[in-house]
Amino acid sequence: MKLRTWYTLLIVLVTINTFGQGASEARPIFKDGEAQIVAAFSKPSEWLRHDLFVETEFDTDGDGKLDRMHVSVTRPKQTETQGLKLPIIYVSSPYFAGVAPNVDGLFWDVKHELGEMPNPRVHPEVKRLGERPIISNSHIKKWVPRGYIVVHSSSPGTGLSQGSPTVGGDNESLAPKAVIDWLNGRAKGYTEPYGDETVEAFWSTGKVGMTGTSYNGTIPLAAATTGVDGLEAIIPIAPNTSYYHYYRSNGLVRSPGGYLGEDIDVLYDFIHSGEESKRPYNNKTVRDTEMKNGMDRITGDYNEFWAGRDYLNDMGPMKAALLMSHGFNDWNVMPEHSYRIYKAAKEKGLPVQIYYHQNGHGGPPPLRLMNRWFTKYLHGEDNGVEQDPKAYIVRENDAQDQPTAYPDYPHPNAEMVKLYPTNGGNTLGGLSLKKTKKQGKETAIDDYKVSGSQLASSPSSEHRLLYVTPRLQQDINISGTPKIAIKVASSKPAVNLSVWLVSLPWNGDAKAKITDNVITRGWADPQNYKSLTESKPLQPGKFYEMKFELMPDDQIIPAGQQIGVMIFCSDQEYTLHPKPGTELTVDLDETTLTLPVIDGKESFKF
């Protein structure tokens, strides 16, 4: 009996040592710098789920009362039975309670001349969905078993949250701040939207991490720019970091990919699922006044309205550790959104990492990267994550959970290389490392009815100018942000300017990979040749110089391909569709393409 007793005791001791929990106590456990699944936290039937309403510091629905945000909590039972305190994974969204139907007329009509106002659009109503106390089930199965509490909230003017949506206004930063303040005992939470009974987050350690994708990834950044104490780390996935960059491009009215004709007021209608009685006031105040007066679909200029919805302008107070995630072929929320914030955070000296994959919209970092990030900054485990590589990039033929580690992004060995066009762009002009004088001027005729892919794959076209390198004799790794300096003239006072960087020969196979053809893109309004804040009608026939960036990229162009730059006018998928016929003329002698290439000119072998 004694031998069996000691054996049983040994098993208990080993269990406690190995799994970090005894019969009466459960706690988070860690291995290799990551939070592990804990059996005692892993039974959904035992999770405690409840909701509440957190009071903010603003009133945006005009009822004279401070708006309250609807918040739901999912936590292990041990936070009640053992007095266990745990850190929080927090997700906020305007989408949890449903969105507007995609009715005819929801989007702006893009078929009109540049500088003209289109016909009015339709304003659909959102039918609110969802029941208390559960706002969302996202992320709970991933994080609750690993020793976190998961919190969700609906953003202002959506679901049961009070207030008005502003699509990037200050209240969308202050709302998650209020929730984090409540999790730290600095704000009031109530059991009912208009009641007086308070509720406290006694189970919270006060350490909060935020994540989410797209709009849900924008909100973590918005919260971080307030500098709120307790928000230790954020993992934004494909976040919209500037609504100007989302709906405009270098002064040009440009739609996000897949949503031709969308603008900020369309998104407002799409998410406005809050209390029906408050909607008329919100619509009049935000959509029909602030947005109508500020969004400016006539010139596309950058102004105070857009500056107030650009989180790069608000990063002074930010102190949260940042792990950024994005896809290089995301043509909805384009990759410039993530890079501009990553760069600024790095310059501030914040802990940063960036993860890029080669696919489209969405795509979180691998779980191990997220786990290490939250384990360090929320649980306080010294796992050395700050010494990990700064950049993780999924190579073209690899799975998204198998990124390659790099010292940083762009790669430190990337050098800017200038390339010069040589004439023949209506068929195939050249793109050379050496400048050849007296290449002259060449013209493309605008026609939105011809798609960009048709233009790039055609051996000749009067609707585009295409300049290509000789065939590459070895792989070339582009890493960073390509730039173009171009001198152009238009036959009319306004013209769309679109630039694609392509890999040729074009792969027209239906099974072509997303990286096979388009390397990156960019758009601009020549009327903004002086600045983003000032448009001036073009004098027909007069040449103007412009410099702008294409979207950031990190892509290996394989040997045997040619790199081409295609210059054209209206981009069928992204820009307005004016009547065809405008002539865009390019002065080749004053036009250059600059590519960030690992090892610089030495990589170019023709």
Image: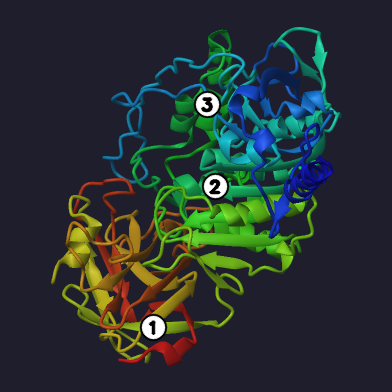
**Which quadrant of the figure has residue 37?**
top right
The secondary element bearing badge 3 is classed as loop
Instruction: Give me the disc on residue 419.
Output: 1
The amino acid pointed to by label 3 is: Phe
> Could you tell me how far apart the alpha carbons at marks 2 and 3 are, in whole angstroms?
17 Å
Q: Is any atom of residue 370 visible in this view?
A: yes
Residue under label 2, please give it. 239
- Residue drawn at the location 56% of the way across and 38% of the way down: 216
**Mark sitting earlier along the chain (2/3):** 3
For label 3, the residue is: 96
Task: Say which residue appears at 53% left-offset and 19% top-offset.
Answer: 283
Q: Which amino acid does label 1 sit on?
A: Leu
Assess disc 2: are there few (<14), some (14-19) or many (≥20) residues with their C-alpha within 10 Å of its C-alpha: many
Give the foreground label among 2 and 3: 3
Q: In 3D space, how far apart are the residues under numbered discs 2 and 1 (Cα atoms)?
A: 32 Å
Q: Label 3 neighbourhood size at 10 Å, few (<14), some (14-19), many (20+)? A: many
Dot 2 or dot 1: first in sequence order is 2
